[in-house]
Amino acid sequence: MLSAWSEGLRDKLSLPLRVVLWDGRELEFSSGPPRVTIRVPDRSALRYLRSPSLYNLGRAYVEGDIEVQGRAADIISIGNALAASLDKGRGRLGEALRRTTPHTRELDAEAIRYHYDVSNAFYAAWLDPAMVYSCAYFENGDEDLATAQQKKIDHILRKIDLRPGQLLLDIGCGWGALVLRAAQAFGARCVGVTLSENQAALARERVARAGLQDRVEIRLQDYRDVEGRFDRITSVGMFEHVGVQQLAEYFARINGLLAPDGIVMNHGITTTNVDNGATPYGGGQFIDQYVFPHGELAHLSTVVRTMQEGGLEVRDVENLRRHYARTCAIWTDNFETNAAHIRTLTDEKRFRIWHVYLAGCAYAFAHGRISLYQIVCGKAEGAVERLPWSRKYMYV
């Protein structure tokens, strides 16, 4: 039975893969040298290989039911090939991921703590020095990560036409890189909000070190509890946690916080699956269980529609999918380069989760399964248009 399975798979595709069984037998799936080795410690673990969805393979690796050796990019590429060879469960998995998530303040805070409060040292081991955990902007294509992240922040701040003295709200401020840059280089007054205690603590330290306490405030606060009126609002890598059913309410809340002539920038991941929002072969199910609990991706059409329902008018849309593929590939390389150190900062299970998650995201962006859009918008009705007539101002 095992021989028939391996021969049948070998007939379908040739992979640089070796499978080492519990009794020492080795199965080769190409004539060339293997780039990935899967070790199956006992017969029961064969079920993952016989039904190799991305969820099953990812779960088996993360839970330690199988051992996988190789570069993360090769592991993900071969995992996708195995899943595609069966091409099962696409619709079923998609339907499962469309369940309604309540997205209460308590559940959202819990999900954010799970993902972001691993430790600041953990993220510092593979992010750029400014610890920007979102898509970088490779203006020329040859920038290093730190330069590309700085260019991304400046790209955003130019897009919203940030002026000295204006009040900026950054929803999901992370470790504070954007608000620090907005205050230092653009002369803005800033409020950054996050639900991560670790992020808030380090962001406040950075603000203090920069001597910007009078111009930058970091709050441990839900965006739904923010009050006031802001000239500019940014949301970078945060709205994926809001929930598709809550997007119109989310944008309406932003609209309510925005000054009459204010400008908003929403920078976030979208699905390219217009039908049900799921990524194929169970990849989304793995992300939901192990990486981003309660996270949901909307299609671009849904984002634009819900912005309008929330009272916002879209002014500019830019696709940065290729930029995020490169960003995630660099993060993956950094993670593997510093693997020995990272293993001292967390447990083995979480190490394995991030090991395949980062490479999986690079693959998904590179192959068009998910995308990244920056959308500039303002109030849809009664707005005083303050942006320049053309887009030239964005690229000064």
Image (cartoon, grey):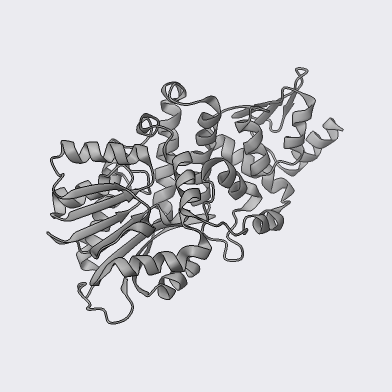
Q: Residue at x 42, y 40 (%)?
A: 116
Q: At which x and y percent is residue 162?
A: 19, 61
Q: As rendered, which of 78 and 15 lies closer to the eye?
A: 78
Q: As rendered, which of 154 and 100 lies closer to the eye?
A: 100
Q: Residue furthest top?
A: 24
Q: Quadrant of residue 63?
A: top right
Q: As rendered, which of 136 and 248 lies closer to the eye?
A: 248
Image height of 95 relative to 389, above or below: above
Q: Residue furthest right?
A: 1
Q: Residue at x 33, y 78 (%)?
A: 380
Would residue 109 be found to the left or right of residue 147 on screen? right
Q: Report how many numbered discs are placed on residues in the image.
A: 0
Q: Residue furthest bottom?
A: 382
On the question of residue 299 being in view, the answer is no
Q: Which image quarter holds the C terminus?
A: bottom left
Q: At which x and y percent is residue 98?
A: 62, 59
Q: Which image quarter holds the N terminus?
A: top right
On the question of residue 191 being in view, the answer is yes
Q: At which x and y percent is residue 25?
A: 77, 20
Image height of 148 relative to 383, above or below: above
Q: Residue at x 63, y 53 (%)?
A: 280
Q: As rendered, which of 35 and 389 lies closer to the eye?
A: 389
Q: At which x and y percent is residue 176?
A: 27, 44
Would residue 306 be found to the left or right of residue 178 on screen? right
Image height of 309 relative to 45, above or below: below
Q: Residue at x 42, y 52 (%)?
A: 322
Would residue 278 be found to the left or right of residue 315 on screen? right
